Image (tube, coloured by chain):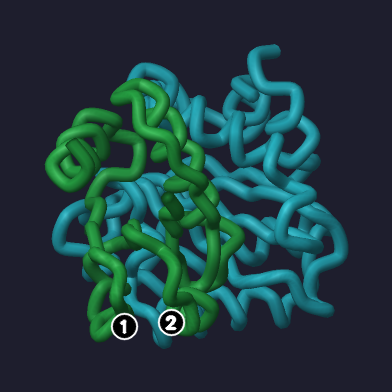
Chain colours: A cyan, B green
Amino acid sequence: MRFPHLAAAFAEHSVQVGAVALDRDHAITLAGELLVASGRATPAYTLEMIEVVQTHGPYIVIAPGIALAHSKPSGAVLETGLSMVTLAEPVVFGNAANDPVRLVIGLCAVDHDGHLTVMQELATALSDDDYVNSLLNAVDNEGLRSLF
Amino acid sequence: MKIIAVCGMGIGTSVLLKMNAEKVLRTIGVEATVEATDVKTARESRDAQIILTTADLAGSLTGLPSEVITIDHFFDLEELTAKLSDSLL
């Protein structure tokens, strides 16, 4: 296991391989539903994540093909956690530099600094192109989770 | 010197940006503190020399005394190094 904090943040039922998303909001919704399925947030958090993009624009596409969907700490967050969706077909988020998106990560945090060790590992993992490709090439959910 | 990394909410993208900016500053030998924050807090800030953010958010951060630097690829240390070096060295 290369990333113990990521392994803990990605709970059971928090990943989905080869999902079909019709558009940006649908892709964010899929990541939100996994935070709900894995017990980390309530459905209200999914709506909050969509509102962030509607308010601030598609800045959450932080690198080519990678979106980090998130809102802020709120009553809709049960526990700090992550979710991950790999998309069967890339989806345009409207981010000129980094479209289209193939990997959507959902993030919820209970406060502003309790998740920094997780973010450190996430930054290290996503900086490694080979590792990102291994995430994108995972063939099933268990295979994807086993990479953390 | 103070640098702030800004995203809409202050917990996700700005934290990743802060971490990589700190890495780059160490490499180019610049002493600075980097804080991750949200757009609203950043707009009230007057003491940051540089604001690091994304193209989508830069429009919300005009009219401040800080220099605004936009980053496209958060994990591309070469882009961060080039843009921070241009400003600081």
Q: How many marks?
A: 2
| Residue, far top | A1
Seen from the viewer's position, the closer of residues A55 and A17 is A55
**In x, y percent, where is residue A85?**
51, 48
Asked if residue A108 is positioned above or below residue A22 in the image, the reply reads above
Based on the displayed image, in which of its 4 quarters is residue A47 positioned?
Answer: bottom right
Q: Which residue in the protein does label 1 denote?
A: B60
Q: Is residue B85 above or below residue A51?
A: above
- In the drawing, what numbered circle is on residue A126? none
Name the chain under label 1. Answer: B
With respect to residue A121, does A33 lie above or below? below
Q: Nearer the viewer, mark 1 or mark 2?
A: 2
Q: In what element is the residue under mark 2?
A: helix
Please provide percent x and percent y for residue B65.
29, 75
Q: CA distance from mark 1 to mark 2?
A: 8 Å
- Within 10 Å of the Cα at label 2, are there few (<14), some (14-19), or many (20+) other Cα atoms? some
Q: Amino acid at mark 1?
A: Ser
How dense is the environment of label 1, judged by Cα within 10 Å: few (below 14), some, or many (20 and up)?
some
Name the residue at 78% across, 66% down: A41
The amino acid sitting under disc 2 is Arg
Q: Give the mark nearest the N terminus, 1 or 2.
A: 2
**Point 16% across, 55% down: residue:** A97
Quadrant assignment, res A147: top right
Instruction: State whether discs 1 and 2 lie on one chain.
Output: yes
Q: Is residue A97 left or right of residue A105?
A: left
The dot on residue B43 is 2
Query: Of residues A122 and A37, which is closer to you in this image?
Result: A122
Q: Chain of mark 2?
A: B
Kindly state the secondary structure of the residue where label 1 is placed. helix
Mark 1 near mark 2, Cβ–Cβ under 8 Å? yes
- Residue A86: x, y in percent? 45, 44
Residue B14 shows in this picture: yes
